[in-house]
Image (spheres, rainbow, N blue to C red):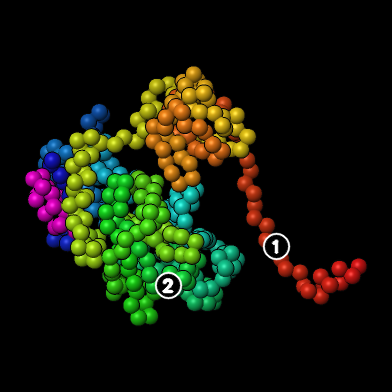
Amino acid sequence: MKLGILSVAPNCYSTRRLKQAATERGHKATVLNTLRFAIELEHGEPDLCFRSKHISDYDAVLPRVGASITYFGTAVVRQFEQMDVYTPNTANGITNSRDKLRALQILSRHDLGIPHTTFVRDRADVLPAIERLGGAPVIIKILEGTQGVGVILAESTKVAEAIIETLQSAKQNVLIQRFIKESRGRDIRAFVVGDRVVAAMRRVAQGDEFRSNVHRGGRAERVEVSPEFEETAVRAAQIMGLRVAGVDMLESDSGPLIMEVNSSPGLEGIESATELDVAGAVIDYIATQVAFPELDIRQKLTVSRGYGVAELQMPEGSPLIGQTITDSGLRERDIVVLNLTRGTSVISNPRGSREIEANDRLLCYGKLDAMRDLIPEKRRRKRRVKVQKLDPKLLEDLETQ
């Protein structure tokens, strides 16, 4: 395999380890400075130049795109995608994960835990937003901070208001996030490769510091994550469009809460803490994908007019509930079930004898009109009503009337 590692820092630990792991496995790996590319756009022939020369053929590229060059870096990755060069992390995946607000928006519609977060711009909306989070203390984050930079703990509402006002005056967009007190100073970094967690570490803040990042002096220790944490990490990475990612999670009383999905996770901290060959796992995965790459079926199967991919939800009362896939009549309607999601379990290529249950989600390929007829009418969202406590004296008066 001929691999290009896209990085502006050839001497940093992660880049060196990835190149070393590839070389040890007999692959040819070259570090390519992301900023030295020129993107060539011509009818039917997307191309790239590197150092003013047309780039040679590569089997795969591994992006290590830093936050400071996100726009240009993702443009280069996108061009490689158009040239049918495999990349484990797509340009869209990197862009989705790089913006904290966008990432949480995408994750929030899925059955995954995230800390209660709010985003406001008008000063008059700050105090009501903090109240909705349960009051101070709260975490304040700038949208594109990395390695713990731009993450602030505000102990009181007045301090939070002052910090937000200062950051907004400096043209910074900020998130306000509920403080998870039970996980103070601790989080878990799970390193996802493909569909599994290959290594995980718990990061523990030192002294009065609440941020656990290794770059902020945090101590890292190896940890074996539970199936719940592993499944959360893998699903979060895949939802973002990443096959190599570092997923940071808080250990809350209600289970794992996703803080961030990192598209260019560092290797030094996790390899030192776990003593595992994480770089090797990344290279091995890329090599298998070059030989037999996964396809995004939502993009690849919408080529025939009137056909496409859709997810059918089975609410209570659906006529398909209680029937097997074979007896449901889906195949007669020209609909094929690709996988079935039940709770947090995904059943790929389910057998025809599989019985459909309430709240199952069927990922199907087939006639769009036929599938549209099976989708129930969209229900309006139920708004949460805030219940105010009555004054005890008023309640006593009402009871005596």
Query: Residue beneath label 2, please?
Result: 184
Relative placement, left or right, of 241 versus 114 is left
Image spot of residue 51 (x, y percent): 12, 47
Relative placement, left or right, of 69 versus 326 is left
Image spot of residue 342 (x, y percent): 48, 41
Quadrant location of residue 260? bottom left
Identity of the residue drawn at 28% across and 65% down: 222
Image spot of residue 88 (x, y percent): 26, 44
Rendered position, 326 above or below 358? above
Identity of the residue drawn at 12% across and 42% down: 2
Residue 398 in the magenta stretch? The answer is no
Q: Amino acid at mark 2?
A: Arg
Rendered position, 354 above or below 229? above
Question: Which secondary structure, mark 2?
Answer: loop
Query: Residue beneath label 1, please?
Result: 387
Residue 23 in the magenta stretch? The answer is yes
